[in-house]
Image (cartoon, grey):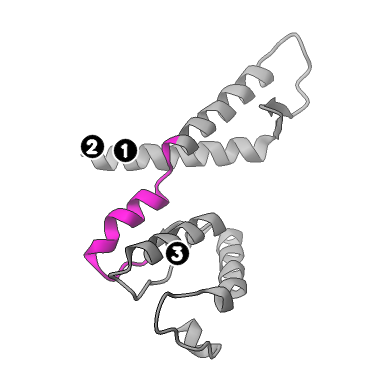
Amino acid sequence: DLSKEIRLRPHSHKATRSGLSTSLQVTILAARAYNKLVIDGVYNHFNDDEGFREECNQGKEWGMDGKTLIHPNQLSAANEIFAPSKEEIEYARRVLDCWEAVSSNSDEQFTGVAVLNGLMIEELHVESARKLLERANAIASFESS
């Protein structure tokens, strides 16, 4: 594994990924360049729910799409954390509504920029919002089947 190859010292208690951060972030960049998903590695302390959640949240913040699981008790936390939150879904909807309102306004020439609560919104934000809502809809469809 990567920790072994770069000769990180093993941790006997709560895991740390500080020695892996550059490698993991380069992995995320490479995956995105080829339109691939990034699934975070295992968390070996499978009875440490707090540490597992912390690592999942870190992975999500870095842009990972999911987590490799080694124990059934990790499933619900991983699903909860990596699925779009209600707040993320609501914000994505507001981004799309704002974009649509500005881009379809026939009274003004659309410049390719909208403003939502003082934040500049461009096409890249709209694309991210659409992808997030697609993921949320796919999860909802899966859960309802």
Identity of the residue drawn at 62% across and 23% down = 98
Q: Which mark is residue 55?
A: 3
Which sits in the foreground, 45 or 99? 45
Name the spot of residue 87 as percent of width and height, x first.
Answer: 47, 36
Q: Is residue 17 left or right of residue 111?
A: left
- Amino acid at pointer 3: Glu
The residue lying at 71 percent from left, 10 percent from top is 106
Of labels 2 and 3, the one closer to you: 3
Q: Farthest residue toward the top? A: 107
N-terminal label among 3 and 1: 3
Q: On the image, numbered disc 1 is attached to which residue?
A: 140
Residue to which mark 2 is pinned: 144
Relative to 59, is 9 above or below? below
What's under tag 1, amino acid-wise?
Ala
4 in magenta = no
Residue 85 found in image quarter: top left
Do callouts 1 and 2 mark residues in contact (Cβ within 8 Å)?
A: yes
- Quarter location, residue 12: bottom left
Circle 2: is it few (<14), some (14-19), or many (20+) Cα within 10 Å? few
Q: Residue at x 31, y 38 (%)?
A: 140
- What predominant SS class does the magenta segment belong to? helix
